[in-house]
Image (cartoon, coloured by chain):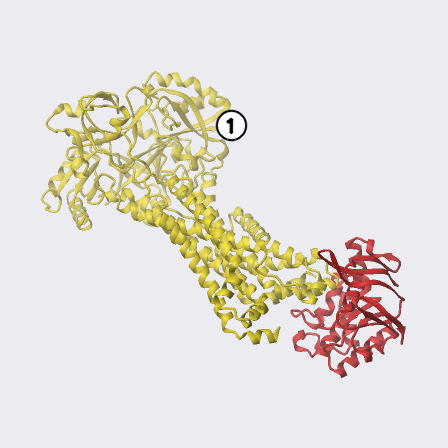
Amino acid sequence: MIQLKNIEKYYRSGLSKTYILKNVDLTIEEGEFVTIMGPSGAGKSTLLNILGMLEDPTDGEYYFFDEPVHKLRERKRNDIHKHYMGFVFQAYHLIDELTVYENIETPLLYRKVKSKDRQSMVAEVLDRFNMVAKKDLFPNQLSGGQQQLVGIARAIISKPKLILADEPTGNLHTKQGEEIMELFKKLNEEDGVTIVQVTHSEKNAQYGQRVINLLDGWVSTDEKV
Amino acid sequence: MFQNYLKIALRHISRNKGYVFINVIGLGIALACCLIAFVNYQAGENADSYHENYDRLFMVVANGVGYTQPTADVSSALVPLAAEELSGVEAGVRFDKRGVTIQYGDAVFGEGLALADANFLDVFTFNVLAGDVNAMKDPSKILITKKQAKKYFDEETAIGKILTINPGQEGERQLEVGAVIEDVVAQSSSVRFEFLTNINFLETGPRPDTLSNWSNRVNASFVLLKNPADEAQVTQQLAKYIDARNQHTKWKRTKYLLEPMNGLFMKGNDINNNRLGRAVHPAFYWGPGIMALMILLTACLNFTNTTISFSNKRLKEMGVRKVMGGGRMQLMFQLLGESLVICLLAVAVGVILAEYLTPLYNAMWSSMDLALSLDYFQNTGLWVFIGSMILITTLLGGAYPAFYISSFRPSHIFRGNTKFGGDNWLIRSLLGFQIIISLVSIIGGITFAQNAAFQKSYDLGYNVDGVINVQIRNEEEYTRFKNVISENPSIQRIAGGRNNLGFGNWNSNVGNPEDNRSAQTHLIGEDFLEVMGLNLVAGRTFDKNLETDFTESVLVTQKFVKEWQWDNPIGQKIKHYYGNEKKVIGVVEDFYASSFFDKPTAGVFHFMKPDQFRVMKINVGKNNLVETNNYLKEKWTQHLPLVPFNSYYQDEALMEATMITDNVSFLYLFLAIISVLLAATGLFSLVSLNVLKRAKEIAIRRVLGATAENITYTINKHYFLVFAIGGIIGALLGGWFAGFLIDQIFKVTQGVSLISTILAVLAVCLVGGLTIGGKLLAVLQTNPAETLKSE
């Protein structure tokens, strides 16, 4: 599904380069549940952003289903991004002005899904996550765990092949965190969604099948759980 | 999708009421001003266009020896002949106006009677509300406007009533009301009338004018062409009538020209002897437009500034939307849509506000009879204007923020290192613009206010304050009334004249026509100079006991002497006003006859006997004007009950000038207050944002021991530069523009004073200082430890 060849990310300051990522080679197959770990500043989030096409690498090649992403035009890249990927953030990043229902609906609007289909798709997800009663509330009326549920619901509403999660439980209590992780596991096992998560927590890493450790921009270890 | 945008726009608005309020009110005021300025401009631009034949109508004017501008003074014989002989001319209409008294029962009023050819209503479009549409063709009929019908007959039907028309001396006639015509709107018509009858009126009566005579003339001559494209051809053909006219008079014409009805209203001042009535200075139409646009520009700048300032809150949303798959164009449309919603709200406010302001604006120009209205049902131009205003405002105010906010990468936004604020060069330039506009308006306001004071105390060279003028029609009225009122001790002196200083003085040729010289004509009676306070600087004044003074002597002004470069003016001989050679017996000190609109011009005084008088001038001193005027009215109605009493104060000659300076300075100050307020809100939001953005830096600096002055300097060093550059440009531009405008309107001005510039700069700096200072005080009162903790 994903193949990274010699990905590098650095900033130039004067003559010297500051590396965020260096020589990253990585292959992720469809259906995998991958965890990226490493100390602060190791480049975890940058790697995730590059995978999600939110950031461009400075150098290297990125193939997504054999498409050379690094050569694609912005529009085409947006298309891939739009059709294959869902994002979950540590800080949830819900739109404060929209209700639960509207937040979940937003990705469908950008995919030009018809109104009727949208209604049934959102209803289905709300039902699945047991959130029907909360659909008209605004994010600030929900607990952190509930907000993250909305975040995940939003990420999967358009049936992505890949979910990228940046410390999805970082702001949650242990109990809520466990629930969220169970949900990811279920999505991976039952729906076959590929998941890449960034986390600090060893415990969370246990939900996945593979752990990649980053250190100062390098891949230091890459092993099955 | 659209619903979603609308929803979020409305929720965004409801959560940022302060921001919305500032912009809706600011833009609303600006749009209200623009609406009024637009209908004001439309009134001038579309004047006369209600005539169905508008495009084919032309006024005939002529170039002549001794005139630099074309003159409306053409022979009354011309257009009927042209209509008959020239293939391109469908019809010719002559239009004239005479002062008459009109009597019905006990009611007597002095009125203007318009006279026109029988085809007048076929060529021009005036709605006949009642009566016979062919009444013009019957010389025994008179047509009156609805307003006059009400005045004379109350609500009774006017048709068939007999009015007694008295043109002045003798020749009283009875005319029957044949039709009632819709009121003519003065602000949109070159051809105006209240009473109208067939021009045949002039050819009958005891002292008839023969209109087919080439030496006769009428106020205005119009032709209706079959095809407007024939203009050049008809102009050429008209040349053949030049000789016929020139044989009969010595004021030779060189060429006839056609002046299209389209634009005549605005151009009226450029045509000599245009007796259709005072045309309005074009500045009256474009001036308010410029001011309104300046207000709109400040409001838009402010809109841009505050939108960007408030956008920090939107960044996360934009990032999320991008991650969710929103393209940049989609986001820009969303943001522009939100600007559009604010603009629509502003339009609503503007339309309501304009409804209130329009009557106030009309009332400001009291003597102009202004009747602007916002007629949304009939005026399609208004809708087009509002539509384009919405578009322009949305784009002008919203485009940059939309472009800017949608440009950020979500990964940067989420990392929290995207914040923006008052450190962008564009935002700083916008602030600079606001400062410039504020300065331009303040300088203009002060300049016109100072000018008003200057003009009020300016010595025009004659007695403006203590004179009452009474209109008279003949010698009998003059002598009778003079005898009646002479007993009143507060009346110091009485004089008569044929025309009056300051009220429509005209120029006549001096010498031979080919000399191309002219001078203002003053036809005065005994004691005129004394009553008017005009000083004699050489020679002697007229003596009523010397019969030759009436026929052979003139007085001239200093300016006249200068123009003719006479070392010794007394005894010089000139030809002026009907051409007899007369001898200069004295020189009068220069004075401003045309209020402040013109410099003193060369003038010639001719001596008139009481049978020529049309105005009685009564010197009563400054202090009992009103009282004496009441007394005059009482005596007049006692002794001349059938003649309407018509009086006016001499200082009314300055009324228009006073009204204009007062109004322009008022408009300017209005503009100044709004632009300063808007600039202050813009500045405030910029500084707030800057402070917010640099809260941590400021806190650290304070912990490290920075004083209040250090902090002030650190935060504001950019604004100092903006203020300095904006201040210099604004001061220069403001001074130039105020000077330009005032010179366009007046010839007697004080110009732009240094004080006005200094005051304006001080005011802007003061407002800026207070705005920044207020915010800074708040910052300095917070505990830096708190700030650092929360960071």
In x, y percent, where is residue B272?
36, 30
Give the chain coloured yellow. B
Q: Quadrant of residue B579?
A: top left
Residue positioned 46% across, 51% down in the render: B727
Residue positioned 13% across, 44% down in the render: B491
In the picture, measured across the screen, residue B14 lies left or right of residue A105, that is left
Residue positioned 81% across, 77% down in the render: A183
Callout 1: 10 Å neighbours few (<14), some, many (20+)?
A: some
Relative to B635, does residue A64 appear above or below in the rendering? below
Q: Quadrant of the C terminus of chain B?
A: bottom right
Looking at the picture, tell me which residue is in the foreground, B498 or B338.
Answer: B338
Give the chain coloured red. A
Looking at the picture, tell me which residue is in the foreground, B558 or B129.
Answer: B558
Q: Quadrant of residue B553?
A: top left
Relative to B209, does residue B448 appear above or below in the rendering? below
In x, y percent, where is residue B51?
47, 37
Q: Quadrant of the N terminus of chain B?
A: bottom right
SS of the residue at dot 1? loop
Pointer 1 residue: B226
Would residue B366 be seen by someone viewing this image from the given angle?
no
In x, y percent, where is residue A122?
76, 70
Looking at the picture, tell me which residue is in the foreground, A66 or B203.
Answer: A66
Amino acid type assigned to the residue bearing label 1 in the image: Lys
Residue positioned 26% across, 46% down in the render: B457
Would residue B679 be seen by someone viewing this image from the given angle?
yes
In x, y percent, where is residue B479?
13, 36
